Each structure stands twice: as structure tokens, then as C-alpha cells.
Amino acid sequence: MRDFRGISRLTFSILVLCFLTQYGYAQKKPNIVLILADDMGYMDAGYTGSKIFETPVIDGLAEKGMVFTHAYSGGANCAPSRAALISGQYSPRHGVFAVGSMTRGPAEHRRLTAVENRTSLSGQIVTIAEALKAQGYATGLFGKWHLGYDNESHPTAQGFDVWVDPRHPNPNKRRDEPTDPKAIFSITDLAVDFMKSNRDKPFFTFLSHHAIHTDLEARPETINKFKKKNLDKAQTLYGALIYDLDESIGLVKAFLEESGLAENTLIIFASDNGAVNISPQEPLRGNKGAFYEGGVRVPFIAYWPKKIKPSVQHTPIINLDLYPTFLTLAGGQVRPDLDGENLLPILQDKQKTTKRDKIFWHFPGYLHNPVIRGRDSIFRTRPVSIIRKGDWKLFLYHEEWVLDGGQRKIDENNAVELYNLKNDEGERINLATSNKEKRDELLKDLLAWLKETKAPMPRPLTE
């Protein structure tokens, strides 16, 4: 046996550190696993109150993790929400407002000229993957990207070491693979293999699922399970898809536990936006594509054994907060061009709410097909900007604002809707004319934000 009595404390410490590093015992930066569902609504999980769908694994994460009851997507449908998450910026800055065209729906019912939409993420944006890679992280994206595939915007040009999507380039086309029709388990297996290969360094693993998004496909045995509930065909498939997704999350959790990585890994589970009309989100209003609560409020859980205490947080957050949170966790410096807020003080139970008091959305175009209990019988949304401040939420609809008298006729032109979410979570009672003081306060804040971000605005058709 070696005699260490003659060496200095410094030398001994160096020897111990080298030993620990050699045998994998030295503490490395925390791993980050982000699991993002596609079109899973806030009310679609068991822990949020669903009586139809079953999510035992997600419910387990909620029981032992930190649940956010007022978590929001950065957009009301896929691409803008993902752009907000990846860039850490609001839509006026990254310019991805919609999926493809901003003029979806009958032209004769559009009163304004929509803003031109970016269909890919600019290469000038430093993405969350690039920022984490600079901090020494292995970065892997498995599944949906949806932000462009040219040389500038391709995932591997935007900071991901690895990108694999079993459903690319036809993500919504049915595929004849009964054991994994939605590629849920293929995506999960690829992500687990990536984590196995990179377990000796910190990793950022992004499981970006295609479930629940249409087409609705699930494993035959899961479909049979939900047929017993006597649901209609669409809800049977929808429930089966959620159940398959839930099971796959259990596989990720099991791998982290069995590999000894769980206690050094933060798991975030969320959705990219609200549910489609197949799943009514009552008591929340609306669905995917609209900016009422049912379109932008999403399930959100932070899970980290022994690091995050089980709790429920009611403070409003938005998915662009993930960028500064992950970057701070990795030891990086948050840049001023990020619009989100670092949530680590909340996750570490050092702070009960965010420092900011306002969240914003801006959508200067049109999405066709109305949502449940929406404002419109033709469109999911028309051009609109939104602010949430405290318990209050205000909508500014630009057609009425631009063409019907604006602020001069605000009491009669229906340009503004105002809701108190504390007393009216379902956004049923418009208080714009009965609480003018609060309306004008939020409107002033929203107009200032639109000016500050140089938000592009829709124009009259005659211009």
C-alpha cells in the first residue's frame, strides 16, 4: 500500500481529482433533457384534470417535480413556438410568425395585408444549442425541427452535433410501421443512444416529438385499450397517441436512473402549443392557432431528483425562458438579446415568482379554421397582439384598430378584449369597456413593447 504521508495537501488533492476524473466520479456540468410534445393541450394530462386521457409517467413527474400551471408557448402553433424556444426571443425579433403562409383562409374575409413570414430560422441567431455547445455540451436533436433545412438554418448549422428525424421529410404522412407509427419510440431510442455515447460529458438532449400532431397514429394495442372507453374515433387515436408518448418518457427516465445519471440531469417536459379541436380544453377557451388560453397555455414540468422540490408554481412563464435557464445552468452568461428570464432561482426554491411582470405575443397575419369558443367563425385568429400582466390579459385586434377608428373609438369598435384570468380563467367576460383604467394601462404597455421590438405590423389592403 502506498504511503501518502510525505506529500503536500495540494499534491494529494490533485491526485484525488485525477483519480475521480479517470474513473468518472468527478461532478460534471448538469445534463439537460428537453421533451417536447407536439399539440398536446394543457388539459390533456391526468395531472391537469383529464378524465379521458391517461398519462401515468407524466403524472409521476408532476408529483415529484415542479409543476407550472401558467406556462405558455411562444406562439399558437408549431414553428413560431419552436423558434421562440430555440432563439430565446419573441416573434418580432426572430420573424417566424406562422407555419408557411400568413394568409391562410379566404382572401375576401381578410381586411389587412399580412406581414411577410420567415419560414426558417436566421443563421444570425445564436441558438440555445450553439450556446450550450460553447459551454462544452454535446447537443442532440431527435425528431421535429420545423425551422428550415438550408445551409444556414439546418439543425447541424444551428448548433446541434446530431440531428435525426425518422419522419423527415414527410412528418405528417402516414407510415406503415405498426410498432411505432409516429416514430415516438424511434426518437426515444435515438436519444438514449446519444446519451449513452456522451455520458462522460454534459449533454443537451432534445426529444422533439411529432405526437400528438395529425395524422393521428398509434400502436394497435394502445388503440384497442382506448376503444374500450367508447370514445369517437379521433379521440380514441388521440388518447392512444398520448399514452404511447407517456410510455416513451418512462423509458428516458428509466435509462437515466439505471445509468446513474438521474441526479445530475434536469428534465423538462412541455408542449409546443395547445391542442387541436379534437380535444376541447375547457374550462380554457380556444385551441391551437388562437391566443386564448387553450391555444397557448401548455403542460410544463421541471423534474430533477434531489435538486427540485415537489411543488406547484402559478407564476406565468413562457418557453423562451428555457434558453437563459439552460445557459445559466451550464455556467454561461445570459446575453441582452434574449427576451426570456432565467428560471433557476424558482427551480432552486430561492424565488417564488419571476422578476418580470409582463409576457407578450404578436401575430400579424391570418390562420384559417375556427377554434372552439373562438372570436371568429372563419379564422383561428386574425392579426393580433397580446399582453399578459399579472392576472390580466389584453388582446389588441389590428383590423378594428387600424380600420375602425383605433383608440378614438376604442369603446365601440371591439378592437380590444380584456380578461381577468384569476376570476375568469375561461376568458368569457370581456372587461374592456367596464374596466377602462386597467385596459388603458395594459394597452399602453403593449403598444410600447410593439414599438420597442419594432414589430412588423399588418397594413390596409389599399397600401
Image: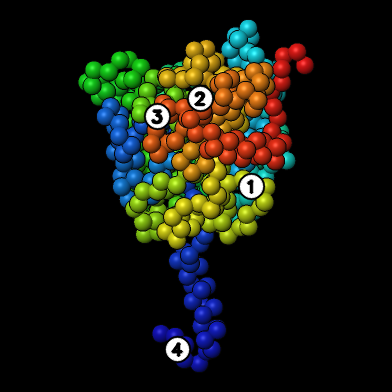
Vertical side of 215 occupied by 16: above or below: below
In this picture, residue 191 sits left or right of residue 152: left
Task: Measure how far apart labels 3 and 4 are at the Cα level.
Answer: 72 Å
Whether the residues at callouts 2 and 3 have beta carbons within 8 Å, the answer is no
In this picture, residue 235 sits left or right of residue 175: left
Vertical side of 245 occupied by 345: above or below: below
Q: Which of labels 2 and 3 is toward the front?
A: 3
Residue behind mark 4:
3
How crowded is the residue under tag 4: few (<14 C-alpha within 10 Å), some, or many (20+)? few
In the image, which disc is placed on residue 426? 3
Q: Amino acid at mark 3?
A: Gly
Task: Measure how far apart labels 2 and 3 are at the Cα level.
Answer: 14 Å
Which residue sits at x=73%, y=41%?
124
Q: Is disc 4 placed on a helix, strand or loop?
A: loop
Give residue 294's position: percent from left, percent from top: 43, 29
Which residue sits at x=26%, y=29%?
51
In the image, which disc is placed on residue 256? none
Give residue 141's position: percent from left, percent from top: 54, 39
Q: Which of labels 1 and 4 is toward the front?
A: 1
Q: Amino acid at mark 2?
A: Ala
Whether the residues at callouts 3 and 4 have beta carbons within 8 Å, the answer is no
Q: Amino acid at mark 4?
A: Asp
Of callouts 1 and 3, the N-terminal one: 1
Whether the residues at callouts 1 and 4 have beta carbons within 8 Å, the answer is no
